[in-house]
Amino acid sequence: MDLAFMKTRSVIRCRLCTHIKLLRLCSGPTNEDVKLNDISRYEPSLSAKFTQEDIQSIVNFGRGNHLGNLKVPAVALPPVIVDAVNDLLYAQKGLFKVIKRDAATLDAYLKSRTAPYLNPSQTKFNKNQWKAKMMARLEALDADLTPGQQQMYAEEIETEGERRRIELKQMSGFWKSISYDSHNACLAYTLCRAAPNYAVAIRILSEIARRDPSFSPEAVLDFGSGCGSLVWSLLAMWPQETKFFYLNDVSNEFNNVASSILSGDDVDFNPIANGIYFKQHLPADVRPNFDLVFCGYTLSELNGPGSRLAAIKHMLKCTKSYIVFVENGTLRSHHLMEEVREYVASNFADQFEIFAPCPHLKPCPLLLTNLKQQRKSLICRTSVTYLPFPVRNHTKPNASSEQFTYLVFRRKPSDDLVSQKEDDAEMRWPRVVQPPRIGTGHVTLRLCSSDGTASQSIVSKGKYPSFFYLMCKKINLGDRLPLPSLEAFEIESESVSSVDDEVEGNNDGGAE
């Protein structure tokens, strides 16, 4: 065999083994310490620049163990809550199949529902009255019209009236209020929405706890509490710290169901003795008394922008630290979040700063791209994996995924300016707004940056360090890319709009 060929094969084998060892080093068990000698054996250039602690942090970074990693494992409901809900379901003898069918129908309707764009007074349109008014104006012109011309004008008025009626109906989003005054309706909602609502709350609260370890809510306001899923998540996250729960829901029957779920088998359970207060209205005192204000899937239940903005203003005044808004991961819900962002930026910019998920308080660049290109494909949303509600004596369902869009605002500190400056670098971390595309030797990321722009960045294997490339391969939708801690890495990027224009130009006549 040729000696040169043998040397070439030996070099290739050596490089391959080195690459495999480095991959094992960055993806191995997190409880094993990585020695400086091991790193210098695989990447000698690193040992001269970093200490043992720096090397350990670099390897953990490659494993995805950093503050930008916001993924949580599949979320399951607490067993105590599952047993309590199952007891309520089976207490309705002979009606479980009906409740289960109603739950499936309600879940599909809630996911397809859109919030109204206009207030109720703006959507009222009587087509017959409008037609009569237009015909009276036509007759008042005293024009000599032939019967054919009169018939033509009448048909045009009829067409215009129908067009206006449909347009106003579409602007209202075909929205109708849902009544939860019956016990079975509340159980149907709990059966279909308890697990995803709980998982979303765990995901958002975990992000707050990870980025702000000193935060522990003592008083909490839940606007639209429903079955009480926020209380379950708070007891799972901060079992001893939270002392006061203000649960607001207009349905008295829903408040009774939530209280029954919390009590479980304890017949002597007293919500007030445990700091849990069920109310049908927001607190009259608008002072910032609540460490956490949570508005989950409730803005879409209000009948127009006027009601939404009034509720948002009231909740912002009651917020002491954090306020959270959550809606379904649809384009209309994305518009709702942009409505909230614009209202806060216009009226409360001196009091609140955006905490998550965006690194800026400017208009959403994804919506601007949709408007520019007349498309609806770019939505700022995140997903969480959860286990659906396990009904007793039924087959356990497989894990599912819930897509949602959310905003978290934090009241600006007035006295701790030093900690605010220390958090500035972390607040500027860009966020992954589209699922990463992993190619051969490179990863394509779509990021929302602190300057209010969305860009597409390509991280190649040969151009950047191995640990940074491995981290980008493991990043998920909704995670934050810790770029300020890696100031030496200049990530080449291109605006999302220009990239999409190029893609559409190369795919004429086909779907993108």
Image (spheres, helix red, strand yellow):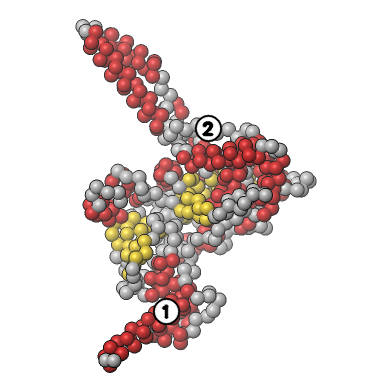
The quarter of the rendered structure image containing the N terminus is bottom left
Choose mark 1 or mark 2, whichever is in front: 1
* Residue 193 percent coordinates (x, y): 57, 45
**Label 1: which residue?**
20
**Residue 218, percent from left and from top:** 63, 53
Which tag, 1 or 2, sits closer to the chain's start?
Answer: 1
Tell me what residue is drawn at x 30 percent, y 55 percent. 496
Could you tell me residue 110's position as x and y percent?
Answer: 51, 40
View extreme (front): residue: 1
Residue 416 in view here: no
Q: Report if residue 138 is visible in the image.
A: yes
Pointer 2 local density, CA inside 10 Å: few below 14, some 14–19, many at least 20: few
Q: Is residue 27 left or right of residue 75?
A: left
Label 2 near label 1: C-beta < 8 Å?
A: no
Count the marks: how many? 2
Residue where numbered disc 2 is placed: 177
Identity, as a three-letter code, of the amino acid under mark 2: Ser
387 shown above or below 106:
below
- Residue at coordinates 60% horizontally, 55% vertically from top-left? 76
Secondary structure at numbered mark 1: helix
User: Viewer-proximal residue, 171 or 421?
Assistant: 171
Q: Nearer the viewer, residue 96 or 499?
A: 96
User: Residue placed at 44% from the left, 57% from the top?
Assistant: 478
Q: Residue at x 76, y 48 (%)?
A: 266
Task: Please provide percent x and percent y for residue 292.
Answer: 57, 51
Which secondary structure, mark 2? loop
Callout 1 crowding tier (Cα within 10 Å): few <14, some 14–19, many ≥20:
few
**In the rendering, which numbered label is found on residue 132?**
none
Of 126 and 82, which appears nearest the observer? 82
Whether 29 is drawn above or below 294: the answer is: below
Tell me the kind of residue under disc 1: Ile
Q: Quadrant of residue 334?
A: top left
